[in-house]
Image (cartoon, rainbow, N blue to C red):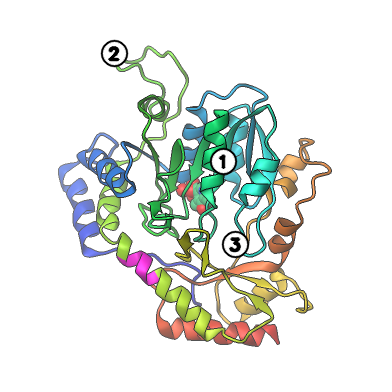
Amino acid sequence: MIPVNEPVIGARERELVLQCLDTGWISSDGPFVGQFEQRFAQEVGRRHAIAVMNGSAALDAAVAALDLKRGDEVVMPTFTIISCITAVLTAGAVPVPVDCDPVTWNATPEAILAAVTPKTKAIMAVHIYGLPMDMDPILTFAKERGIAVIEDAAEAHGLTYKGRPCGSLGDVSTFSFYPNKHITTGEGGMIVTDSDAIAEKCRSLRNLGFNPKRRFVHDELGWNFRMTNLQAALGLGQIERLSDNIAKKRAMGKRYRELLQGENRLQLPAERSTGAENVYWVFGMVLDDSVPFDAQEMMRRLTECGIGTRPFFWGMHEQPVLRRRGMFQNLSLPVAERIARRGFYVPSGLALTDAQMIEVARAVREALG
Ligand SMILES: *Cc1c(COP(=O)(O)O)cnc(C)c1O
């Protein structure tokens, strides 16, 4: 079986993790957490970085730090992971999902801005599968209107938009270090911002709202979202690999493109979008309408050939759990609905070999019939 993802962990990570074990610094109190935060902030060009236990927690804290009021609206892409909308709902705000572009699979500024109402207090931008959203029109508009921008850069380590790092664009931005991301800490996440107030609030929310002056006296409710020294040790080793990992991902994207050349029953990822070159977080494909079956059947066929796959995101507006709560009843977002049914991605982990890519491409052609 060729797995859909397999991370690469090196000697440096091993050495740093062993240091945690040897010194006994295994909790969040160890020295690597602060070091990783500093190193990461520098990488993304931001003043503050706050390490947390995963990317979903990063979103929860980032959205909570904006102090949204009940009924405030947050415009966001429907085509994303559930963590994005969970964070908005947890904050008591109203999510307003919008459709995505059929080529880049990212929400467009047109769709985002068209959904803004007088109640909109935040926009959540999410960069999807290795290409960024076209941020400038959104940032300009948000600034004029005093609307906050949350940027979910979980899939966008090392990606730039018009020369600026993704993760440097929102009032508050978040990352994930799950093993299928460009760098991993097993589980892990990071919040970055230039705002002292947001950073302070996120640090407090991460640590149960402990009052820094009087421990066990609380002025607000938080969570235990702390990252451990063990995770930070992995992160410090991994961050040295980021540019190599991105180069490898780009080379893999190029190679898959060559191997699947002329296969017009598949839509492949766009190589570039406004101000950006794809980093191929995953190598996604969408079945053309001429293919007489859907992504489920395609993935079944590939599994039979020993190829790991994953389906595309299922739009938030179609989630049974949210529909059952009466949300999005008559909302139709046709592009996201189509690619949720016809899209899937193939192995593209950092440990993938060229021979495996050849095998994947062969199996994809065969599965198409
Ligand atoms: C992976 C991911 C997350 C969540 O990260 P976890 O670390 O798995 O909780 C959030 N947003 C996007 C867009 C992601 O791809």
Residue 147, visible in the rendered structure: no
- Where in the figure is residue 323, as x and y percent of width and height? 77, 42
- Where in the figure is residue 243, as x and y percent of width and height? 31, 62
The residue at the point 55 percent across, 35 percent down is 142
- Where in the figure is residue 6, as x and y percent of width and height? 42, 67
The residue at the point 31 percent across, 36 percent down is 47
The label shown at residue 104 is: 3
Instruction: Using a 10 Å C-alpha cutoff, classify the residue at mark 1 as few (fewer than 14 neighbours), some (14 to 19) or many (20 or more).
Output: many
State the residue position of label 1.
Answer: 124
**Label 2–label 3 contact, CB within 8 A:** no
- Where in the figure is residue 278, as x and y percent of width and height? 48, 65
Instruction: Using a 10 Å C-alpha cutoff, classify the residue at mark 2 as few (fewer than 14 neighbours), some (14 to 19) or many (20 or more).
Output: few
Type of the residue with mark 1: Met
Asked which quadrant contains residue 14, the reply is bottom left
Q: Main secondary structure of the magenta part?
A: helix
As measured in the structure, the alpha-carbon distance from the residue carrying label 1 to the one carrying label 3 is 17 Å
In this figure, what is the number of numbered marks?
3
Q: Element at badge 2?
A: loop
As measured in the structure, the alpha-carbon distance from the residue carrying label 2 to the one carrying label 3 is 48 Å
Type of the residue with mark 3: Thr
Q: Mark 2 or mark 3: name the one nearer the start of the chain.
A: 3
The label shown at residue 213 is: 2
As measured in the structure, the alpha-carbon distance from the residue carrying label 2 to the one carrying label 1 is 34 Å
Q: Mark 1 or mark 3: name the one nearer the start of the chain.
A: 3
Asked which quadrant contains residue 38, the reply is top left
From the viewer's perspective, tell me whether residue 84 is left or right of residue 196: right
- Span highlighted in magenta in the image: 244-248
